[in-house]
Image (cartoon, rainbow, N blue to C red):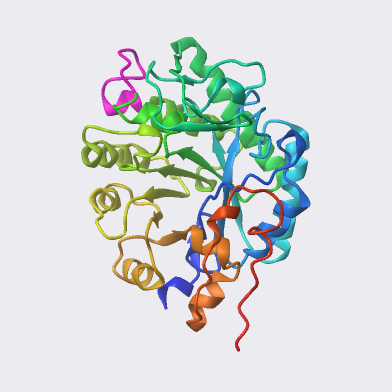
Amino acid sequence: MPLFSPFPLGSLTLSNRLVMAPLTRRRAGPGKVPTDLVALHYEQRAGAGLIISESTDVDPYSGADVPTRPGLFNDDQAAGWRKTVDRVHAAGGRIFVQLSHMGRASHPLLTADGRGPVGPSAIAAEGKAYTSRGLLPFPVPRALDAGEIAGLVDQFAYAAALAKQAGFDGVEIQAANGYLIDSFLRDGSNKRTDAYGGTLEKRARLLLEVIEAVGRSWDAGRIGVHVSPFNSFNGMSDSDPVTHFSQLAKLLDSRGLAYLHVIESASTPQVTPLIRQAFHGPLILASGYTRQLAEQAIAGGSGDLVAFGEAFIANPDLPHRFRIGAPLAAANRATFYSGGAEGYTDYPAFEPA
């Protein structure tokens, strides 16, 4: 079965082709430090060929109002993550950390000093931010000056160095789901006329600079990139995602990356086949895949690995269940962000009747 065959990822060998997708669960402790509960959660799911951690803040100003979202911008956070990494490794797993900057998908209440969110242009994200005062509309972000961007790139570089300190197997750069880098990539949110806006090559400049900066600490074969060409979350849009993201795949192809992780519906892939042609490194598929669809995609060469999200929440032993054809448990969505062990570490492994 293709899903359970080993896969070479750079200098790593994954035990299977199932990836645990990055899943925000809001269980970090004070100071945005991952706790022993977080370590247990990931340890339980170490049967995945690769775990990609939840979105982890590189910006020291973000998330002060919601500290349960983990960070990686100081030594205490690196030490907290080290507990998770060590337990995943002891259980035979591999884990990358996803490095993220919230960008315009933030709120002044979510920052340490009340500063507002930033983005490529002064265009507000759609929807509402989760704050201690409840759900509040996203404000219009401040458009970044070109001279500020180097500082943001350095935040990613510093987080990548801390990831090495924490013992991670690699890093994934979050360039999806309406966060900072994604808002630069897509022309619905990026209306700049300088070196970071206009053509796809210019809109991709921030991502390419982040890849280069992260490469100060990591070989390219340990750096992944996450993109979501059609995801409208946070009011994201693009005038021609098929053309633009296939062009992006060509730009990334020469970088020698560990993988490109693409969110696109399994039922209606439009850009993923073109990305497959343009990007010759490993490709992770995500969104709407069942075991059967994943097997078909890998056997047919559409991708190399398949990421599962909600299924891994309720089924910590998902690879084992897939292998023996066991039924899957349903996730309790009410506990996704509720805190504590319920709906986080209390899902049982499968036991035959």
Q: Left or right? Give the position of 307 relative to 92.
A: left
Which residue is situated farthest in the bottom direction here? 353
Q: Residue at the location (30% across, 18% down)?
A: 191
Q: Quadrant of the N terminus?
A: bottom left
Q: Residue at the location (48% across, 29% down)?
A: 105
Q: Is residue 164 magenta?
A: no
Q: Position of residue 63 (x, y in %)?
A: 63, 30
Q: Residue at the location (46% across, 25% down)?
A: 138
Which residue is situated farthest in the front direction here? 134
Q: Quadrant of the C terminus?
A: bottom right
> Quadrant of the rendered structure where residue 215 is?
top right
Towards the viewer: 72 or 258: 72
> Quadrant of the rendered structure where residue 46 is?
bottom right
Q: Position of residue 205 (x, y in %)?
A: 39, 25
Towards the viewer: 220 or 197: 197
Q: Position of residue 162 (x, y in %)?
A: 68, 36
- Residue bounds of the magenta highlight: 190-203
- Up the image or down, 15 lies above or below 339; here it is below
> Quadrant of the rendered structure where residue 61 is?
top right
Q: Left or right? Give the position of 270 relative to 173.
A: left
Q: Left or right? Give the position of 203 relative to 48.
A: left
Towards the viewer: 222 or 313: 313
Asked if one can make out residue 13 in the rendered structure from this viewpoint, the answer is: no
Q: Please, what is the dominant secondary structure of the magenta stretch?
A: loop
Q: Left or right? Give the position of 59 relative to 263.
A: right
Q: Residue at the location (44% across, 71% down)?
A: 3
Asked if one can make out residue 68 in the rendered structure from this viewpoint, the answer is: yes
